[in-house]
Image (cartoon, rainbow, N blue to C red):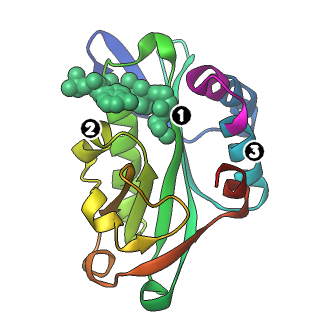
């Protein structure tokens, strides 16, 4: 399914990437992050079956503007029944950043994720940006894992995601490279 949005003067389409988009996505990740680690991460997340959801944004010519992935995180202890995922990587093409594309891409993916019955989403990023989606660094203090700190945030979708904490979390194996 393709969603169409008018963002300023730009018509942006949001859809699930296909196999043939993988090379372009990797190239965008390399440009947006200025390194190849995130491109390698998503390739390995796909290979181990940890990806929960991927989305890409394209312009009216089909050129890639933005991309994100959410992958499975495993909770243990009190929160072991929670469905938890993490948002990473997420990027917008450097030449089209700060035009609202990232906000639309992320909000649309979070809406879809909520519809899938997820309890909690984690992210590591600028609080000034991710707080607009409801990500909360105070709540994340109850989520114990490898990325604890001031830029670690959590967004609950359900009552369980708010109260069945604290929990310890383990990310998919490809994240070990970032610990
Ligand atoms: C972070 C990113 C995805 C945002 O996408 P975007 O399309 O540029 O963002 P939007 O246009 O939706 O939002 C722009 C707003 O976010 C703010 N913003 C963007 N990046 C920010 C950052 N790193 N820190 C704080 N604020 C930021 C802008 O100031 C702007 O604020 P405003 O709405 O008050 O004007 C994009 O900048 C990017 O790809 N960055 C490189 C990769 C990255 O750092 N990813 C996130 C960490 S995993």
* Disc on res. 128: 2
Residue at the disc numbered 1 = 67
The reply to whether the C-beta atoms of the residues labelled 1 and 2 are less than 8 Å apart is no
Identify the residue at the far front of this view. 149
The reply to whether the C-beta atoms of the residues labelled 3 and 1 are less than 8 Å apart is no
User: Which range of residues does the magenta coloring cover?
Assistant: 28-37
- Tell me what residue is drawn at x 66 percent, y 38 percent: 38
Front residue of 151/99: it is 151
Looking at the image, tell me whether mark 3 or mark 1 is earlier in sequence order.
Answer: 3
Q: Is residue 74 above or below residue 80?
A: above
- Tell me what residue is drawn at x 37 percent, y 81 percent: 166
In the shown orientation, is residue 81 left or right of residue 174? left
Front residue of 114/148: it is 148
Q: CA distance from mark 3 to mark 2?
A: 29 Å
Front residue of 13/36: it is 36
Ligand 1 within 8 Å of disc 2? The answer is yes
The reply to whether the C-beta atoms of the residues labelled 3 and 2 are less than 8 Å apart is no
Q: Can residue 12 be found in the magenta stretch?
A: no
**Circle 1 — which element?**
strand
- Labels 3, 2: front one: 2
Q: Residues within 10 Å of mark 2 (few under 14, many from 20)?
A: few
- The location of residue 58, given as percent across then percent down, is 50, 23
């Amino acid at each position: 399914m393709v969603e169409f949005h008018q963002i300023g003067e730009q018509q942006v389409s949001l859809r699930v990437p296909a196999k043939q988009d993988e090379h372009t996505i990797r190239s965008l990740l390399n440009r947006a992050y200025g390194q190849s680690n995130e491109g390698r991460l998503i390739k390995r997340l796909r290979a181990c079956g940890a990806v929960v959801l991927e989305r890409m944004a394209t312009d009216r010519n089909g050129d890639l503007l933005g991309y994100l992935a959410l992958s499975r995180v495993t909770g243990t202890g009190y929160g072991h029944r929670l469905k938890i995922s993490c948002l990473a990587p997420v990027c917008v093409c450097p030449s089209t950043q700060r035009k609202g594309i990232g906000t639309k891409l992320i909000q649309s993916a979070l809406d879809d994720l909520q519809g899938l019955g997820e309890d909690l989403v984690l992210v590591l990023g600028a609080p000034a940006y991710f707080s607009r989606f409801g990500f909360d660094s105070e709540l994340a203090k109850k989520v114990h894992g490898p990325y604890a700190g001031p830029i670690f945030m959590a967004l609950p979708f359900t009552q369980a995601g708010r109260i069945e904490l604290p929990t310890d979390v383990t990310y998919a194996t490809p994240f070990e490279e970032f610990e």
